[in-house]
Image (spheres, rainbow, N blue to C red):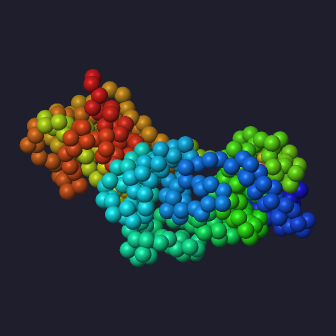
Amino acid sequence: MLGLIRAQGGAGHMPNVAKAQPSAGCKRAETAALLLEWWDRERRELPWRTRPGASPDVYRVWLSEIMLQQTTVRAVIPYYERFLARWPTVVALAAAPLDEVLAAWAGLGYYSRARNLHKCARLITQVHGGRFPATSGELVKLPGIGPYTAAAIAAIAFGEAVTPVDGNIERVLARLFAVTAPLPGSKPTLRGLASSLTPPARAGDFAQALMDLGASVCTPKRPSCLVCPLQATCAAHAEGLAAQLPLKPAKSDRPLRVGLAFVALREDGTVLLRRRPEAGLLGGMLEVPSTEWSEALPPLDQALRAAPVHGQWWAVPGTVTHTFTHFCLELMIYRAVVPTETALTFWADPQRCRWVPRRALQSAALPSVMRKVVAHGLREQ
Ligand code: SF4
């Protein structure tokens, strides 16, 4: 069994973490070997993975790792396949207009990833001669690549002996070593444990094996310890702590923000959309103009003054709701049909606006929340 790592200290203090018991070290090579043996039999077949023995394509590894940030494998697969079919190399992706990349990304969420993907592709093409740097230390300097993604790419594509540590891998490690100090304070300990387990050879396979174990066996609520290849070396299993770990601070509820969105439909069949500022939430994506999203709605007459065109605005029954990472949004939708020659108001910020034909909305770079707004605002009453 791997050593227990106990939290010390009372309530209100960051717990100290004791060192792993000395006997743990001799089991680490065995743990890595058991995990790799299991992975050779049970690995998930995913479109970005190469066959055993084949050399990975770093472009595919990078593309999949960026898409997988904060997103499930199931959601990523169709996007990954479409991107790869349309832009089979980093050079092809770099040559694509940003708008097309954003439109192809629409629906996958966390849109700064798409802008950084494109920026990174251009940097690789223009500065690095179309070749990705081969170390995690260099990769982490590129746009959109944080420490986890850099380690994942370096291990999988280049065999660097590093292990990426995300929430899933933290969970597996916290259980394997029975780390009872709560997250996020225990993160440095868990990263250290990941390093201590990383085998000098097959680091990429080891990283993917940990990912697969976390996804299919050592799952958040009910870990399947009975079929786990690491059961014999797992401290949490031996202690009966598996389902309780890792410990986390209590979650606070997401706050609610509200606003009014204005679906302006021109008589020529176009709909008014606006590009959001590059920085911040949904940066660079298109939106339906709206009021500020705030804790409470201003009085209706004041809110309607933020409309992007003058017209007969009427409330579409119902609301649109959407959950972001840090808050929930509820939008009331107002709609107006206006003449084709209608001028935009000052509040519309005309430089950022454009009239988009209804038939082109499907392929526009609209994030999921705005697709809901458009669908709600245009539906027949
Ligand atoms: Fe996770 Fe259970 Fe395996 Fe330990 S034995 S690594 S808790 S599934």
Give the percent coordinates (x, y) of residue 83. Answer: 42, 52
Residue sitting nearer the eye, 93 or 182: 93
Residue 4, horizontal then vertical, whole percent: 85, 58
- Count of picture labels: 0
Image position, residue 306 (x, y; %): 24, 45
Pick the quarter of the image with the C terminus: top left
Is residue 33 rendered to the left or right of residue 52?
right
Q: Quadrant of residue 304?
A: top left
Q: Quadrant of residue 289?
A: top left
Q: Is residue 239 left or right of residue 62?
A: right
Towards the viewer: 287 or 160:
160
Query: Is there any visible trace of residue 375 in the rendered image?
Result: yes
Query: Please, which residue is most extreme toward the right here?
Result: 23
Residue furthest top as drawn: 381
Question: What residue lies at 31% left-to-right and 37% top-to-bottom?
Answer: 374
**Residue 291 position in % (x across, y down):** 30, 45
> Would residue 237 appear left or right of 380 to someone viewing this image?
right
Instruction: Residue at 23%, 37% (x, y): give it.
Output: 358
Please name whichever residue, 117 or 248, is drawn nearer the observer in this view of the structure.
117
Is residue 277 among the parts visible in the rendering?
Answer: no
User: At 43% from the left edge and 67% from the top edge, which residue is drawn?
Assistant: 120
Name the quadrant of the N terminus.
bottom right
Task: Reply above or below: 283 against 251.
Answer: below
Name the residue: 66% across, 60% down. 53
In the image, residue 311 above or below residue 94: above
The one nearer the camera, 118 or 317, is 118
Instruction: Give the side of residue 274 with respect to residue 186, left or right.
Output: left
Give the image quarter of residue 221.
top right
